[in-house]
Amino acid sequence: MGKKIILALGGNALGESLAEQMAAVQTSSNAIADLIEQGHEIVITHGNGPQVGMIEVAFEAASKTSVHSPILPMSVCVALSQGYIGYDLQNALREVLLSRGIDKPVATLITQVVVDANDPAFADPSKPIGSFFTKEEADAMIAKGAHMKEDAGRGYRQVVASPKPIDVVEKETVLALLQAGQIAITVGGGGIPVIRQGNHLKGASAVVDKDFASAKLGELIDADLLIILTAVEKVAINFGKPNQQWLDRLSVDQARDYAAQGHFAKGSMLPKVEAALSFAASRPGRQALITKLTTAKDGIEGKTGTVIG
Ligand code: ADP
Ligand code: MG
């Protein structure tokens, strides 16, 4: 039986540079095509950390030398990143599907996610974007007004506000494409964050976590399974310690307990586990799977990965 699946691609499914992304989308598309061939209905979502960082830095740099170059609002940077990533991904997937004799249209939706203007996240920027910097580089950027934080022992990154997604503006379109047997690439980079002002949608200076946005979209279109693809095959407790233990299956309550005990790093694994458990808890029968791109197929069959719910 085919499942209705939200497939959330992590950073390593897309790479960190133009050349890496070109290569990564090929590998990712082959893995996605495997799932489509198995009869699953797939909606693709993805992160945009390196790409939105690249876009933001490029426009900031250009604004220093050209009066015609604006500093772009974060919402516009996210919109550009959706277009750029979607362009590479939809073409790579289209090609792989055609080469397997599957005639399924693939399209990228510029997708907006509604956030609350009063979300406390706006007062505490915490979402890492862009590349890693040394302590000295980070101090120089802080002096210019950027918010910088140390990211899980890997160096310093710029951080922006990360409010919770409330609604996906284009959800009916995603559903219409799904019902027509088409593949949508949507809520890229967590979606363009917008605040409702009557009929007007105002872009917000924020980046919505792509795992939370994917979980929210999954609820809205009534998906069965949320798959969060990342750099590890399974989630661990005591991660990186001598008593590290990989987890096969977790109830929502167990996942909540482990999260509260601090087993999952903030800014990397914690939002994935939180998104997974909120999706799994949203309706009986819903599950989330956290694993790697290359083990997604086995994960759906219950052979590997960490299943929550
Ligand atoms: P993505 O680009 O897919 O969002 P991240 O690097 O943000 O990936 O998050 C995945 C990373 O989280 C893993 O590669 C791993 O290094 C780290 N991590 C932190 N805590 C854990 C944990 N408890 N179990 C597994 N991985 C963890
Ligand atoms: Mg991440």
Image: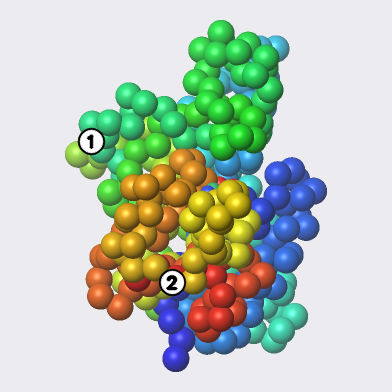
In this rendering, the answer to whether 148 lies above or below 279 is above
Residue 101 vs residue 192: left or right? right
User: Which residue appears farthest toward the front when viewing the image?
Assistant: 242
Q: Residues within 10 Å of mark 1 (few under 14, many from 20)?
A: few
| Proximity of marks 1 and 2: CB atoms separated by less than 8 Å | no
Front in this rendered view, residue 195 or 200: 195
Give percent across and percent down for residue 184: 50, 66
SS class of the residue under badge 2? strand
Residue at left offset 63%, top offset 77%: 33
Q: Quadrant of residue 104?
A: bottom right
Can residue 201 be seen here? The reply is: no
Give percent across and percent down for residue 245: 53, 61
Residue at left offset 51%, top offset 81%: 302
Report, in whole angstroms, how far the alpha carbon at label 1 lies from the one at label 2.
Answer: 42 Å
Residue 197 shows which numbered tag?
A: 1
Residue at left offset 53%, top offset 23%: 148
Give percent across and percent down for residue 233: 60, 65
SS class of the residue under badge 1? strand
What's the residue type where badge 1 is placed?
Gln
Residue at left offset 39%, top offset 40%: 193
User: Which residue appears farthest toward the top when viewing the image?
Assistant: 143
Residue 249 shows which numbered tag?
A: 2
